[in-house]
Image: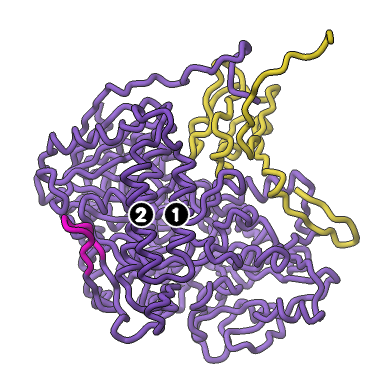
Amino acid sequence: MENEPVVYATPNRPTPGRPVLFDPAVCDGCNRCVTVCLEDILIPNPEKGRPPLVLHPEECWYCGPCVDDCPRPGAIRLNHPLQQRVRWKRKGGGHFRV
Amino acid sequence: MAISNEAGQLLPWPYKVSYGAERAYDCDVLVVGGGIGGAWAAIAAARCGASVIVLEKAATERSGAGGAGVDHWQWVADNPCSRVTPEELTQALIDNHGGYRGGIGSYIQCASAWETLLEMEAMGGKIRDTEDAFRGADFRDEETKLLFAYDYTNRFVLRVWGHNYKPLLREELKRLGVRVFDRIAVTALLNEGGRPGARVVGATGVNVRSGAFITVRARATVLATSRPQRIWTYSSELRGIATFRPPSVSGTGYAIAWRAGAEFTMMEKSMRSPFGSPYSYPAYGSGNAINTWYPCSLVDANGKEVPWVDAYGRMLKTLDERFRPCEGQKFFIMGGGSSSQPHPGFKQYLGPKPIPDLEQRMLAGEFTPPFYADLAGMPEMERKAIWGIMIGNEGKTRIPVMQTYRASGFDPDKDMLQTYDFLRGHGMREPVVPQERTFGEQGACGGMLTDWDLMSNLPGLFGAGDLVFGGQDHSHAAATGRFAGARAALYARRNAAGAVDVAQRAREKQRAHAPLHAPEDGPDWKELNAASARVMQNYCAEVKNEQILSLAELWLKDLEQNEAPRARAENPHQLMRVLEVQDIVTCSQMIVAACKARRASSDYLHFKRLDYPEIDPPDWRKWLVIRAATQGVEVSDRPIAFWGDFERNYRPRHAENLAAMQAGPRVRKVAA
């Protein structure tokens, strides 16, 4: 069997595992979010200028100062776990979700 | 996304590790916890001229239960538009809890929340509708441009733009030369001579990024670490570690003060958990009609509006009535039906709420689920207030709800947010799982017993904010922090520094660093927290008796002695988490001890003993006080209203505080 991928014995990732999402095109790696995070879930990226790494995603409190205090709007956004997505109904039709 | 380099190797710890480092500092006033209460305490103490150090586990700029913002400035009875006096309001708050609300902290809040807020305004915080965006609204005072919430007639709760209050407090700390040490988890209080029960002369801590051990010697110490979370519910898998306050608020102040010999009261009170349930939704992020969303209309799946009633069950005919006291009331406290069972508060103070039998009427077919919060159907001013000032400024709603929902397309002018009430429990209001309890997630809860100086039974140890017995709210934290900071500074003026006991410090360093050397097969902090929570769910939940509580005691001691010491930390961050859970176990032990001590049931305290079923018998209408003594837990009690006359106790101290804050240096040079 050639061309099969190399597969590793990886442990499961912690969940929820994506509390914040970075846009590497906007984020300049200033680490402001790392500084203000209440739970210290982020660490600076070893590569300067790159978005921080989410070391402890399952410890996120989903409070938002990392986004609120970011000097580059759009560089980081909060990402509620899928099971936390609330729905709403539009007057005149349609049912949507976060 | 695995945290590894391209070769798949683990990344080195990003901060310099210094487990061997030991640093020592001196100050007049040490503040433990740089949240709302702690920041205000430090500012007040510095204004009195004290040299101040703040130790904060996160970053003071945003840390604490109120760091992300605040929308209501509660119980501002001293504001110029209020039609109730601080005495009236404090007494109502206490009476509404059957006497079990802290009179000292509550009075300080009701009597000085406004002057505290004026200081926030002077720091740059927005407290008025200066742009006249709400000109003509019923909840606006045209002269002062203040906006009110809930009771528009009596005007003692303010709507504020508090999303940046915490960064402003941080700026003020900097301006005043307060030494703020962020990312320091405090591990112990130091007693004079190393003897628990003696004067507190400082504290120890570890840096949660470097692991360095520090000691601070202080003439006075203010504890401001909020109240324990993760006692009954712990889940990292479900909802943001399932806490209403930040998950790192682990009751450390309670645990270290307990070990140092401080007295605590009302620790037996816990309640079902409307916000902290792992199964609930982002706070204020689903359809509801309480607090931040008060008094949003609810409609059923067919658009049929849910009627509202007043405290006496009379149907309201107009929306305006939701903002007014009803016949038989002078004023009302909050509203929306958020009062928790079994003690819902007294009718003379209850605010309007949606019909309480909505579930039964839905089951009978009168209403069709699911329900929605009809934001779009609210009058424009109310809609703009809810989905604007309130959601835009409350802690944990500005980004998680307002910005995130908007980005998903939610339009407050067109959309109705779904409620989850009755679908899988009671949504925001009342989960149905009795073991999903919380200690003080909402409402007044137990805490450190203090006198009118906000000082504990341990000389030199003061309390501020949530940790002070029987208090609640952002403005409570601010006002009591300000008061405690000034009292601590005055104490520091009158008392020379005590000596740090070298042996106690050495013991504490060993204890604090022990998880770094624990065996590899020990439990990690999550497993330990889950186990501790499980013990509380099983043996300290809805129903209690001597046998059940004794099992809790046995199990927790087992965890404390056999499992917690084996919990392992691989880095300074994990060390912080292990130490937190050790504090959580201690807090659980305090709660169980108090539950064993109260041999009567109480609706006011949400407390049910199967072996003592009589509800609130007269002999047990008292505050139980617990303290760790050499031979186990010592129990004493205080009568209801033990704090005496409000004004006689408050006023002279308040005057002294103001004089000291005005006379002290406004700006102090930062020590090198």
Determine if marks 2 and 1 fall on one subunit.
Answer: yes
Dividing the picture into quarters, in which one does residue B362 lie? bottom right
Query: Is B593 situated left or right of A41 in this image?
Result: left
- Residue tagged by mark 1? B231
Q: Amino acid at mark 1?
A: Ile
Q: Nearer the viewer, residue B619 or B336?
A: B619
Chain B rendered in what hue?
A: purple
Query: Is B560 situated left or right of A30 in this image?
Result: left
Q: Nearer the viewer, residue B335 or B543?
A: B543
How far across and how far down the image is residue B568, in percent? 40, 32
SS state under label 2: helix
For label 2, the crowd category at 10 Å Cα-Cα, with few meaning under 14, some 14 to 19 and many 20 or more, is many
> In the image, what residue occupies the spot 63% across and 73% down?
B138
Q: Residue furthest bottom?
A: B328
User: Range of the magenta residues?
Assistant: B626-635
B634 part of magenta stretch: yes
Q: Are marks 2 and 1 in contact (CB under 8 Å)?
A: yes
Instruction: Please tell me which of labels 2 and 1 falls first in the chain.
Output: 1
